[in-house]
Amino acid sequence: LKQFCSQYKYILIDEFQDFDKSQYELLRLIYREKKDAIHQNQKTSCKNVNIFVIGDAKQSIYGFRGSSQKYFNSFATDFQATKIKLSCNYRNKENILLAANAITEDDSNYNSNTHNQQQKGNVFIHRAPTEHSEAEFVIKCIENLTGGISFFSIDSKRAHNTGQPFADNLSFKDIAVLFRAHFLSGPLKEAFQRSGIPYRLIGEKSYFMEQTLASLSLAIWLAVEKRNLTLW
């Protein structure tokens, strides 16, 4: 432990709200080593170790694997740390933040007043029974946003009578669909393909990285680079 403390002057920890007991105890051992070095006036670099953590207790979602908000909340006391609150959110507009803050306002552990000075946006909550019905709802919202995705929907004005929010006559390039779990991409892709809406899935594995094509590509490379066959 002393060797570790001597090797690193700065320990920077991201997503601290996901720390579990073993990780927190390890951090306390490092801090105790620093305090002992200072108290005993040891000529080691342990006394120069600096610990920095950053996180958001609201985003603590790994309780099922041992993480706990109590470590986040007790850090300032246990480590005699200076607390800096980052209250300006640069990712979301004000209405989204107001909705998010309203969900946790009754929890004393979440005393957040996150804000954003950008123009306010819209928040609409829809509860879908399945991921497939959720995907269909997304398609209907896009239909409403664009004023229709087919001649029939435009001519019949169906897009403006679906009861869906945000009828702004946007184009497809103005719309993004965000989802947290990768398994939701399947139903969304099916719904987009069925409706004929063009889309691009960010972060998807390249078609040429599929196992069959990757093996074929490797075979072609080996055939061309015969001198490298011994590597295979």
Image (cartoon, grey):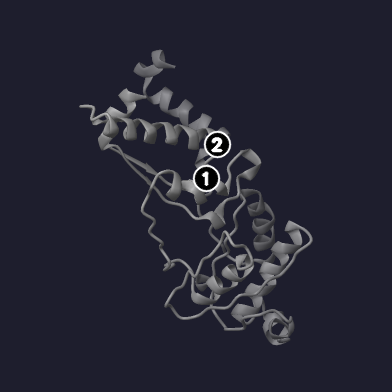
Task: Of the two numbered discs 1 and 2 on the same chain, state the one appearing first in sequence.
Answer: 2
Res 212 quadrant in image: top right
Percent position (x, y) of residue 72? 50, 49
Percent position (x, y) of residue 231? 40, 16
**Mark 1 belongs to which amino acid?**
Tyr
Residue at image mark 1? 71
Res 170 quadrant in image: bottom right
On screen, 36 above or below 137?
above
Q: Nearer the viewer, residue 99 or 93?
A: 99
On screen, 103 above or below 119?
above
If the image is split into quadrants, where does the N terminus sit? top left
Count of number-bearing discs:
2
Q: Dot 2: within a 10 Å radius of its alpha carbon, few (fewer than 14), some, or many (20 or more) residues?
A: few
Residue that sits furthest to the left in the current view: 43
Q: Nearer the viewer, residue 50 or 34?
A: 34
Q: Which residue is painted at 52% across and 29% down in the image?
A: 215
**Mark 2 belongs to which amino acid?**
Lys
Q: Which mark is residue 21?
A: 2
Residue that sits furthest to the front in the current view: 39
Q: Secondary structure at mark 2?
A: helix
Q: Are marks 1 and 2 in contact (CB under 8 Å)?
A: yes
Q: Could you give the CA–CA distance between mark 1 and mark 2, rounded to whole angstroms?
A: 8 Å
Res 91 quadrant in image: bottom left
